Amino acid sequence: MSEKKLITPRKLAGFMELEPCKQLILNEMENKIKSIYEKFAFMPLDTPILELSEILLAKSGGDIDKEVYAFTKGDTNVCMRYDLTVPLARFVAMNQFNLTFPFKRYQIGKVFRGEKPQKGRFRELIQCDADIIGLDTLPLLADAECIKLADSVFTEFGLKIVSHISNRNILFGYCEGLGLEDKTLDILIILDKLGKIGKENALYELNKLGLTEAQSGALIDITLNSGDFGKVLESIKNLSENETYQKGVKELEEVYSYLKAYEIPTENYVLDIGIIRGHNYYTGTVFEMYMPQHPEFGAVCAGGRYDNLAGYYTTQKMPGVGVSIGLTRLFDLLDKNDMLPKISPTNIKLQIIPLGDTLTHCLKLQKYFQTQMVCDVNYDARSFKSKMNSANKREIPFIMIVGETEVESGKYALKNMKTGEQYNLSMEECLNKIK
């Protein structure tokens, strides 16, 4: 009989898989984000990973269609969600008569994108989204709340971020004022790349679209405005009399007043006209968050306002604003730069080691301690020394040694693995000592 051929264990590229000690850190980050979102009165939502293709692809097109994981099951065309926004749009359209508006929801879940995996880009990634949806209208305070939300999350992480904020009506209106309405989207694509391609290349690209040197120069100059929110706002407010432009100015002024009311430190946000956001569904406030000590990370959080979230699924106008943290990418950046929070590689607070025929008694002890902490019984058949070495390697803080003498006396050997101190205590005294 021939030997069984073993399959080499491997995983698909672009899918994160962590060892348990790092998974604990990721879980803790996820829990902190959830806690902050709920503190701001956002309600949880968990939409399915699979959606009907006609639903999921209604708002897509171009490169998105190529990235979607799609398949057919029977007569049904199905896709795996590539973001959490489209499922949200479908949900509010289906449930609009049962929801109270403004509807504030958060969702933390995996999305899937069949793109080429590379540094910082994954095929499976955890998104942490928070959105506020209005019915017909939505006050601009919601925009400032999403910025405050992101600032609070990163403050909780102990990470310094600066929110770069703008309003798409500024550049839309400026283009209109220059008589370039029919070329606006193409212009914005070029201006959105200004930081990457540089001023000279941007001038060349704009001139190729048919813009004059004066028009191209003026557009680049206004796009490069960035800095103290109040000062930049004052410097641009009268650059165009266009109605759309002035709408953008007034919206920025209002959002600015709310940011000050939230008492966000002024060094934590700037007005940056160069923040455009590539998605065409953004219609007003847009923002991207950067870590000033690590500009090479790029944006670690982003979002903005959109006029009509569910326009493909209902005639009811539902404006919204949202913020999204790509947790998988953020975790990967922090991990590769040795910036992850330092926590114990295990969540076990107490491990009980039975000696002799005491296992069933140890299980009773475990039940008692589990009401207060994570408690584990090491029932492995290895030697006592091996068990102690394993506990030390896993950085388990307390060990309880239970032999037949301990069972008879009701006094147990409790060892503090950090200090090396050992005590002989009752079950209740052990609990108090550990706590």
Image (cartoon, rainbow, N blue to C red):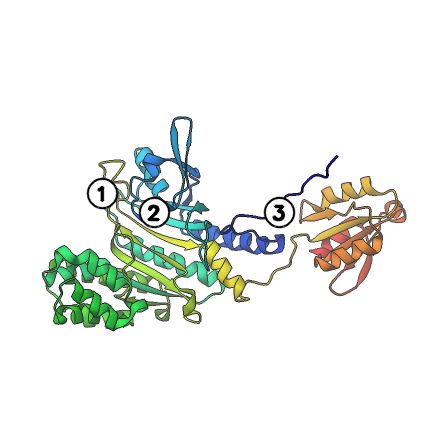
- Residue hosting label 1: 136
Q: How far from the left and from the top, in percent, is residue 119?
A: 46, 60
Q: Which of marks 3 and 2 is nearer the N terminus?
A: 3
Image quadrant where residue 423 sits: bottom right
Position of 405 with respect to 209 (left or right) is right
Tell me whether the residue at label 3 lies in contact with that at label 2, contact meaning CB atoms closer than 8 angstroms: no
In depth, the one of 52 and 399 nearer the eye is: 52
Quadrant for the C terminus in the image: bottom right
In depth, the one of 150 and 194 nearer the eye is: 194
Of discs 2 and 1, which sits in the foreground? 2
Under circle 1, the secondary element is: loop
Q: Residue furthest front?
A: 2
Gap between marks 2 and 1, in whole Å? 28 Å
Query: What is the crowding at mark 3: few (fewer than 14 residues within 10 Å), some, or many (at least 20)?
Result: few
Under circle 3, the secondary element is: loop
Q: How far from the left and from the top, in percent, is residue 377?
A: 75, 46
- Residue hosting label 2: 64
- Residue hosting label 3: 9
